[in-house]
Image: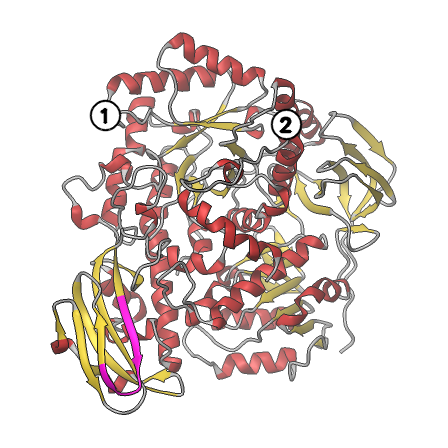
Amino acid sequence: MNTLLARFAGLLLLIALAPGLLRSAEAPAVQSPPASESSLRQRFLDPPARFRILKIIHNFSETPREQDEWLASLTAQGFGGVVTNVPFTNYLQDEARWQAFGRIASQAKKAGMAMWLYDEKGYPSGTAGGLTMKDHPEWEARGLLISDTTSGGGPVALDVPPGKLVRAAAFPVSGGVIDLDKAVDLAAGVQGGKLTWTAPPGEWRIMAITEDRLYEGAHASMSLADKQPYINLLDPAPTARFIELTHQAYANHLGPDLGKYFIGTFTDEPSLMSMFLRAQPYRPLPWSANFAKEFQARRGYAIEPLLAALVADAGPKGARARYDFWLTVAELVSENFFGQIRTWGRKHNIPSGGHLLLEEPLLTHVACYGDLFRCERMLDAPGLDCLTSLPPQVHWFSARLISSAGELEGRVDNMCETSDHSQRYRPKGDTRPVVPVTEEEIRGTCNRLIVSGMTCITSYYSFAGLGTEQLRRLNLWIGRSSAMLYGGRQVTDVAVVYPIESVWPHFEPSRDWTKDCPPAAQQVQKTYLETANQLFAHRRDFTFIDSRTLVEADAAGGAIRYRDFAWRVVVLPCVDTLPLAAWENLEKFWRSGGAVVAVGALPANSEKEFPSPAVQAIAKEMFGDGTPERMNSSAAGGVAVYLPANLVERIFLTLNAIVEPDVRVAGEKCPIRTTHRRIGGQEIFFLINDSPAAWEGDVDLAAEGKGERYDPATGAITPLAGAGGIHLKLDPYGGVLFRFDKAKAPALKKATP
């Protein structure tokens, strides 16, 4: 288990306690700004408010004098503005508080501050402080609850979950696979919350499935904010009411053009509630009154006879049922919650933003959303939550995932809610001492986030022990770094496929977090994280892409082209399942001269066949017999390489044998991390020292001609004669930016067919 996976064991508890679409025809709410050399210089020297730290303030003084003093103190400390909302007291229903909010928004705007609009009283967003479901209890999050056991014959006794009985049945098992067609109906054996049955000889899987509310053990019951029932994100009606109560109320009080005040909205940890953060005796699956009808309409068959396959291995038929179930879940939550908010926001000139729950582990993406990446692509300003400020623990890969989702949609704004929560919060009985974080550690935390694509840092930091001068330094550093990297697009040769569809056929709901997921699902998550970590550690910046990108992209001339992106290498971390059209485009890419690196799995399944003969033929054509590390070439010089999961640490060597990196540093084991962006015809590089020790060495950048070096600590801009042999001395958690007029494409080392 790698270090970040090990971190999850300690951090996920704290995180839990803390706070089939085509490209949209609608115009995005924001556009990439032009960036000339002079405007970049100006943004760097005096970073605008939106690029400095924005404090998250939920309740503020309602007296004008105290409001003005508060805004003045933020300015004096170098902050750029706030994330805020109408005060929580008598939430949304007190006109005096609306007037106080309107004044502070107007005064902040006059002072040149930047603001995001927080959309809830606490979290998770969607309840409007409990108002959304008033008179509508039917809108509460619901799920299927499953109790199950095995038997080799003889008496069986099984506790039935609470709620309405959906099915009670026993399934014969052969070779670990249940036989759906030979199920024995056990509904008559359910009495008083118990299922009893005498099983015939042989191996059996017995299940009791009910439908009930999702609350006990779910995030809604464990929030540090209000503990209350939560809305069903699969149903469009409660979200429509939530928008009416919250977003529309802000428009009613401030005017229909909310973009005059705010960078974006900030929704906080909405989810399906279909994962238990505190162990329960049964497993949950998301459900709603409209789900079966939607599933039938979208997939062309009924899901009810196949529900047992979502919990137990039912062979190829079951694998397709799981794929289709989670695809339908993902479509409904992305359309009915995130899609509705985005549509409303575009009508009011305000990008929809915020962050989702548990962005780090891949398996939680399934349980909470079906497909987190699909939901992120529905946001005009997607976000992230970083609850730690110890840099080695900062989940940079989540920042890259969220920033990639935005960039694939042409977005330029995103945000990261950042804090030292994990260092300070101690639940009752936790005697660990509070851990103060230093200015350097905060800088190192934000460096990781910014180099991974975050454009706005919002803050719940305590800033304990830091004075005004230190806060001003931090705000200048973050402001300069963010301002220089804002807009344009990421420049990288490498795309990494988000492997959510390879989890779906293996995913099984759990009684406690995702602990009951079978080894095949756990392996996809492990390979995904380890692949990303290896690339980051060896300075291989990359874009996360999904199957939609692969399907819609143009694959020709040795590149996968999507919008302004052009990737020459596609990495498949334990990806064995994609739509057939995606596999066909990957094969076309390889035949045209592109490189494909499969880690831990080879192509096997389409969206309809498990396994798929057509996909297996593509795998045979591209990867041959699957000999590890063998470079199989196409006639045009394309490369396909397979690395078993136990060789994931060699992926950087494989990439080095295919294409040179954008940033070259002597010695593979050095703490330099990098990103490259193209902004208004300017090539911008950001290099950070991801270490608490000073670093010195030489670097070569993929650029040509004269350039400039930008020091975010001092504001100094130094001319450079060239992009090679640049000598650097970086402080602990230090960093430096470079600007050049022209990029130099890293050399592609094509294989001989």
Residue pointed to by mark 2: 474
Please determine whether, in this image, residue 293 is positioned above or below residue 622: above
Please determine whether, in this image, residue 233 is positioned above or below residue 353: below
Q: Is residue 246 left or right of residue 467?
A: left
Image quadrant where residue 214 sits? bottom left
Distance from label 1 to label 2 (Cα)? 38 Å
Q: Amino acid at mark 2?
A: Leu
Please determine whether, in this image, residue 361 is positioned above or below residue 675: below
Q: Which of 90 and 590 lies nearest the eye of the viewer?
A: 90
Q: Which of 295 and 128 lies nearest the eye of the viewer?
A: 128
Badge 1 local density, few (<14 within 10 Å), some, or many (20+)?
few
Residue 49: x and y in percent read: 56, 24
Q: Secondary structure at mark 1?
A: loop
Q: Is residue 463 left or right of residue 274?
A: right
Query: What residue is shown at x 68% (from left), y 70% (from top)?
Result: 647
From the image, give the main secondary structure of the stretch colored magenta: strand
Image quadrant where residue 45 sits? top right
From the viewer's perspective, is the residue at label 1 or at label 2 nearer? 2
Of the image marks 1 and 2, the number of the one nearer the N terminus: 1
Q: Amino acid at mark 1?
A: Gln
Q: Is residue 606 left or right of residue 647?
A: left
Badge 2 local density, few (<14 within 10 Å), some, or many (20+)?
many
Q: Which mark is residue 743?
A: none
Residue pointed to by mark 1: 93
User: Was residue 153 drawn as part of the magenta stretch in this picture?
Assistant: yes
Mark 1 near mark 2, Cβ–Cβ under 8 Å?
no
Please determine whether, in this image, residue 448 is positioned above or below residue 521: above
| Quarter of the figure with the C terminus | bottom right
Residue 100: x and y in percent read: 33, 16
The boundaries of the magenta stretch are 146-155
